[in-house]
Image: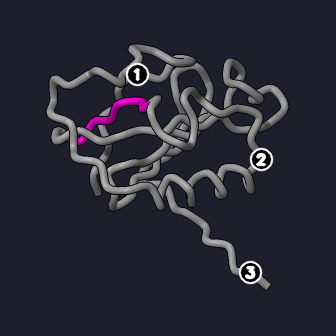
Amino acid sequence: MEIRKIHEPIDARPLESGAVQKLYRFKNNYGASVVKGEHTYGGEEGLWELAVVTFKTNGKFNLCYGTPITEDVEGHLTDDAVEELLTKIEALPVTPLANETNDAVHREDINGIKDTEIHKS
């Protein structure tokens, strides 16, 4: 029997749109923004939408569209499908932290999610 890793978000919060966002960060400087809400792909069915992200030196993140995981967001995801994608993201090679002004892979707004500062504990 295979033991499946459960990833813990570094941040989870409601968004103004009524959606909920979970943010994950891994040692390779990649992570994921996982969102469920009325305006997300699959949200009306209670499913998740996932975007791969890379982190900046200032603690914010960029959406990333250049990985083998996906070139866009992935929608209509079950909890198990999210865990599978998180495992793949965690296994990507290390990427350098972007500087604060590098927005080459950042989309300004996707389903109401903007470049978000991470809450540090």
Q: Residue furthest bottom?
A: 1
Question: Which residue is found at the position 47% from the left and 23% from the top?
Answer: 113
**In the rendered view of the protein, which quadrant contains the C terminus?**
bottom left
- Which residue is labeled 3 in the image? 2
Assess whether residue 67 is covered by the magenta stretch: no
Q: CA distance from mark 1 to mark 3?
A: 37 Å
- Mark 1 or mark 3: name the one nearer the start of the chain: 3
Q: Residues within 10 Å of mark 1 (few under 14, many from 20)?
A: some
- Which residue is labeled 1 in the image? 114
Q: Amino acid at mark 1?
A: Lys
Q: Residues within 10 Å of mark 2 (few under 14, many from 20)?
A: some
Residue range highlighted in magenta: 59-64
Q: Residue furthest right?
A: 45
Q: Is residue 113 left or right of residue 98?
A: right
Residue 34, image x, y percentages = 57, 40
Q: Amino acid at mark 3?
A: Glu
Q: CA distance from mark 2 to mark 3?
A: 19 Å
Question: Which residue is found at the position 49% from the left and 44% from the top?
Answer: 32
Question: Which residue is found at the position 73% from the left and 51% from the top?
Answer: 81
- Mark 2 or mark 3: name the one nearer the start of the chain: 3
Residue 3, image x, y percentages = 69, 80
- Which residue is labeled 2 in the image? 78
Callout 3 secondary element: loop
